[in-house]
């Protein structure tokens, strides 16, 4: 069982995402939240997949691509830290990732399938961790963080963007 991180080790940034997660066990949260994300994006009509709620904002497809890209990066960080790698990891510019993602030439259905595979990989990664590896502190984007925090961030990050999708796009 991978419980939520201790409140004392969380910055305000991490808390804002992790507090969105209702479950108390990480694998359950990742499974439930993953299915919620799949269901929400699957409900979007083909005609709306390139919709932006405002000029300069991401399209619905770009929003899902961002969730996928971020999850991959978070997984990489979690893997490195769970293997007790002391190397400080750099941040990334999510807007540059979207610009260079080629998701405009993909369908929303294709991105949903990719999300399913990435999420399943996330679940396997965290299932492979034990209490000794999940709480090793590493540094990413200037922040000290553990794989436990990253796992909960993954779930909360997707919830955050699904809320934005519901509020601003649908």
Image (cartoon, grey):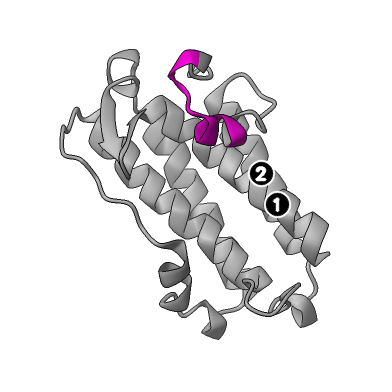
Q: Secondary structure at mark 2?
A: helix
Asked if 167 appears above or below 54 in the picture, the reply is above
Which labelled disc corresponds to residue 162?
A: 1
Crowding at dot 2, Cα within 10 Å, few <14 / some 14-19 / many 20+, comes out as many
The image shows residue 155 at horizontal and vertical percentages of 57, 38
**Magenta segment, which residues?**
8-16
Q: Nearer the viewer, residue 72 or 124?
A: 72
* Picture quadrant where residue 129 is located: top left
Report, in whole angstroms, how far the alpha carbon at label 2 lies from the one at label 1. 5 Å
Asked if 12 appears above or below 62 in the picture, the reply is above
Q: Nearer the viewer, residue 166 or 28?
A: 166
Query: Is 15 a magenta residue?
Result: yes
Marks 2,1: beta carbons within 8 A: yes
Q: Is residue 148 left or right of residue 52?
A: left
Q: Is residue 13 left or right of residue 43?
A: left
Residue at 65% in and 52% down: 161
Q: Is residue 45 left or right of residue 22?
A: right
The image shows residue 91 at horizontal and vertical percentages of 33, 52
The image shows residue 131 at horizontal and vertical percentages of 34, 14
The image shows residue 137 at horizontal and vertical percentages of 28, 24
Which labelled disc corresponds to residue 159?
A: 2
Quadrant of the image containing the C terminus: bottom right
Number of marks present in the image shown:
2
Crowding at dot 1, Cα within 10 Å, few <14 / some 14-19 / many 20+, comes out as many
Residue at 64% in and 28% down: 19
Residue furthest toward the bottom? 105
Asked if 139 appears above or below 47 in the picture, the reply is above
Q: Is residue 166 left or right of residue 82?
A: right
Residue at 61% in and 31% down: 29
Residue 167 visible, this angle: yes
């Amino acid at each position: 069982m991978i419980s939520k991180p201790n409140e004392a080790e969380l910055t305000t940034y991490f808390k804002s995402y992790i507090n969105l997660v209702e479950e108390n066990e990480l694998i359950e949260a990742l499974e439930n939240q993953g299915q919620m994300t799949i269901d929400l994006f699957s409900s979007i009509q083909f005609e709306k997949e390139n919709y932006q709620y405002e000029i300069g904002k991401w399209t619905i497809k770009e929003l899902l691509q961002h969730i996928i890209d971020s999850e991959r990066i978070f997984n990489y960080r979690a893997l490195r830290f769970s293997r007790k790698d002391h190397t400080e990891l750099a941040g990334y510019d999510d807007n540059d990732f979207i610009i260079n993602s080629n998701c405009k030439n993909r369908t929303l259905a294709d991105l949903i399938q990719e999300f399913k595979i990435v999420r399943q990989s996330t679940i396997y990664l965290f299932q492979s961790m034990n209490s000794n590896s999940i709480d090793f502190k590493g540094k990413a984007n200037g922040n000290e963080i553990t794989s436990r925090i990253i796992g909960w961030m993954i779930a909360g990050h997707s919830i955050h963007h699904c809320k934005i999708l519901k509020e601003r796009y649908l």
